[in-house]
């Protein structure tokens, strides 16, 4: 169980991070209003602010709780959305980001937004570590009872001595 001092620490950090995040969202809304038209860039900035807010909320629950599988999502729809949302970043570096699947729909039990964050993190890492003017391919397939999601890039890969540690929270 999380100690009272750790909980207070996470609560304090949460408050300190949410204040500038709220100001950022207000500035984005104001800039978009002044521009007079909606843009993909402003919409993506708003989504990123929302994701930061969700991450802050997770800081308060992550250390000791195992998430419940309380949500049913379409994995194919989720992957398509993630590839679409990361398209602007990929395009800026001349990276061709694509998604393929043998299935049109895969309904699965999930834990809220955690699966979204995990796959988004994989795609963002691929974008960060793959050379410019190359390709990243996201693929999903069902093999019997197993679902396999592959994010294939042209980066150097993770060194063998780092493989165990990359799954620790906040490890870089």
Image: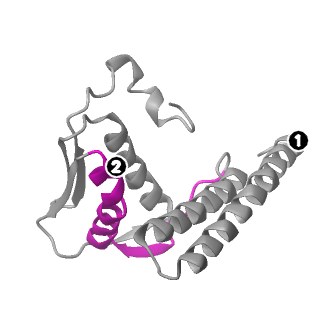
Residue 171 visible here: yes
Q: Is residue 125 left or right of residue 28?
A: left
Q: Quadrant of residue 31?
A: bottom right
Looking at the image, which residue is at 51% across and 72% down?
A: 70
Q: Disc 1 or 2, which lies upstream in sequence?
A: 1
In the rendered image, residue 34, in percent from the top left (x then y), is placed at 59, 77
Residue 106 vertical placement versus 98 (above, below): below
Q: Residue furthest top?
A: 161
Closest to the observer: 3 or 42? 42
**Image mark for residue 123:** 2
User: Which residue is situated farthest in the bottom direction here?
Assistant: 36
Report whether 100 appears left or right of 4.
Answer: left
Residue plotted at (68% across, 55% down): 56
Q: Closer to the camera, 147 or 38?
A: 38
Q: Is residue 141 visible?
A: no
Q: From the image, tell me which residue sits under label 1.
A: 5
Query: Residue 38: within the magenta?
Result: no
In percent of width and height, residue 152 lies at 21, 43
Q: Please name the residue shown 87% across and 48% down the image.
A: 8
Which residue occupies the foreground of this view, 51 or 23? 23
Which element is circle 1 on?
helix
10 Å neighbourhood of mark 1: few (<14), some, or many (≥20)? few
Which of discs 1 and 2 lies nearer the camera? The answer is 2
- Point 58% across, 54% down: residue: 66
Closer to us: 30 or 7: 30
Q: Which residues are magenta?
A: 65-93
Residue 73 painted magenta: yes
On screen, residue 154 versus residue 158, left or right, reads left
Query: What distance separates the C-alpha of mark 1 from that of mark 2?
Result: 35 Å
């Amino acid at each position: 169980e999380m100690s009272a001092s750790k909980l207070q620490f996470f609560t304090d950090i949460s408050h300190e991070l949410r204040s500038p995040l709220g100001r950022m969202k207000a500035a984005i809304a104001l800039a978009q209003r002044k521009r007079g038209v909606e843009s993909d860039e402003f919409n993506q900035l708003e989504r990123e602010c929302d994701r930061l807010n969700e991450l802050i909320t997770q800081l308060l629950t992550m250390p000791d709780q195992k998430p419940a599988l309380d949500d049913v999502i379409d994995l194919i729809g989720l992957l398509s959305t993630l590839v679409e949302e990361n398209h602007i970043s990929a395009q800026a570096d001349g990276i061709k980001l694509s998604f393929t699947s043998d299935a049109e729909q895969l309904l699965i039990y999930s834990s809220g937004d955690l699966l979204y964050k995990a796959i988004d993190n994989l795609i963002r890492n691929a974008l960060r570590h793959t050379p410019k003017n190359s390709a990243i391919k996201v693929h999903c397939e069902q093999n019997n009872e197993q679902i396999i999601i592959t994010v294939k890039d042209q980066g150097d890969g993770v060194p063998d001595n780092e493989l165990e540690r990359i799954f620790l929270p906040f490890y870089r």
